[in-house]
Image (cartoon, rainbow, N blue to C red):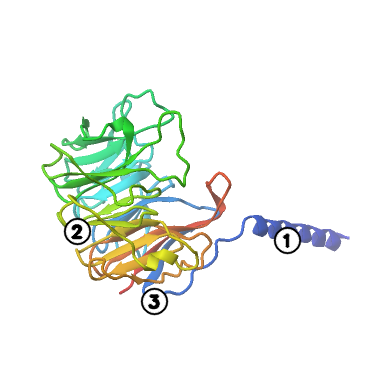
Amino acid sequence: MRWLMVALLLYGVALLLGCWVVFYPHPGSFARAPHWERVWLSESPAYEWVYDMDFADAQRGWLCTSGPTVTRTSDGGSTWREQKPAGRPMRPLSLDFADERVAWAVEGDGHAVDVTTDGGASWRSHPLGPGYELREIAAISATEAWATGPPVSTDDQYHPTTCLYHTTDGGVTWREVSLPVRWHDVWLEAISFVDKTHGWIVAAERAPRGEDVPAAEARPIYIMRTTDGGKSFATSAIAPGGSFHGSCRLSFPNRQEGWVALGWLSLLHTGDGGKTWQRVTPQAAVTGGKKEGPVALEDCSFPTSKSGWVVGGGGLVLHTRDGGKTWQRELTGTETLRESILMRVVFVDERHGWVYGNGGDEGADMIPHPAHMMSFVLRYVP
């Protein structure tokens, strides 16, 4: 009798597991790829979402995840370990290196910034004043940085906007910087400084008060630039095509050459420091592999003016060696994953680069379900 009860119990467990697989299918497995290897993986039941990734050089890099700590590598991604500065939790939302030793990070709630001056071995934290909630950050030096975030005082809780902030005392105090567009009309999508004086900001027109912009509806964008360290900003252009939706990332290998990944709008390129922009649509991105139609380009990284990489939906990775004239698709092994999307690409030079992405299904509320999602980091193998 006991064996019958055990058999029925095992049958019930098997039935439940079968239903789990049907309703929460596994995101799939990685295929072999000639030039990419997986060096970090997080999946259920301890699934962690990756917010940002940056590398100081070919060896030292950091992941900002939804876990209670920052994850660090000192061997180019071969091994990773959690880091708790001074024994405290550190959960950065965004991260940017000024050089091999100096980096800034925004804490997950946006109410504090962390600064390192020893390549990430130690960090010091600066809580922000009441009302501050920083998002993106651009590091200049150990004392200077730029950041975006909602205005300190606003009554518009349902249609928030972003302002530009600047600090020159290591993050102790921040001041709001005037821009050529009104802050309550735009959302600052991306910010990048190539040195102390030259920086660029991408701003998207926000939804009118009382209206919601559907996810598939595009918004006009503006690209602003400064050549005097933020004393003044000029509006460069309204992007060709007039609109975009999705992610937005900037990559400037020098003061003149720059690229912007604009989701469905593909790429924008400037060769004159951002005075003018041209639209670039890599032919390999039109079909996006398995899927028909255009693919959202999530990020770009150009370590030199000629060599660059672009990543996006469907496990898409594109590489150019001639400044965007021609593109080659790189297989990463993530094309076989369910709903694979590559979110961030970082190349510190032409031979050392990394990509992070996600794979799996999203529920009706578009929130990834930890039972059938995974995050991963891939390393380029020349």
- Nearest the viewer among 363 and 296 is 296
Task: Name the amino acid, label 3.
Answer: Pro
Considering the image in quadrants, where does the N terminus appear? bottom right
- Taking 277 as reference, is 65 left or right? right
Can residue 107 be seen here? yes
Identity of the residue drawn at 72% across and 56% down: 16
Q: Which badge, 1 or 2, is on the more N-terminal residue?
A: 1
User: Which residue, given by chain and number where applicable, does mark 3 sit on?
Assistant: 34
Of labels 1 and 2, the one closer to you: 2
What is the C-alpha distance between the residues marked 3 and 1?
A: 38 Å
Kindly state the secondary structure of the residue where label 1 is placed.
helix
Instruction: Sort mark 1 into few (<14), some (14-19) or many (20+) by Cα contacts within 10 Å.
Output: few
Of labels 2 and 3, the one closer to you: 2
x then y, percent, for residue 112? 31, 36
Give me the disc on residue 146.
Answer: none
Identity of the residue drawn at 35% across and 57% down: 266
- Nearest the viewer among 46 and 298 is 298
Residue 155's place in the image compared with 331, above or below, is above
x then y, percent, for residue 152? 31, 27
Kindly state the secondary structure of the residue where label 2 is placed.
loop
x then y, percent, for residue 104? 25, 45
What is the C-alpha distance between the residues marked 2 and 3?
A: 27 Å
Instruction: Sort mark 2 into few (<14), some (14-19) or many (20+) by Cα contacts within 10 Å.
Output: some
Q: Residue furthest right?
A: 1
Considering the image in quadrants, where does the C terminus appear? bottom left
Kindly state the secondary structure of the residue where label 3 is placed.
loop
Give me the disc on residue 14.
Answer: 1
In this rendering, the count of numbered labels is 3
Identity of the residue drawn at 39% across and 26% down: 156
User: Which residue, given by chain and number where applicable, does mark 2 sit on?
Assistant: 253
Task: Name the amino acid, label 2.
Answer: Pro
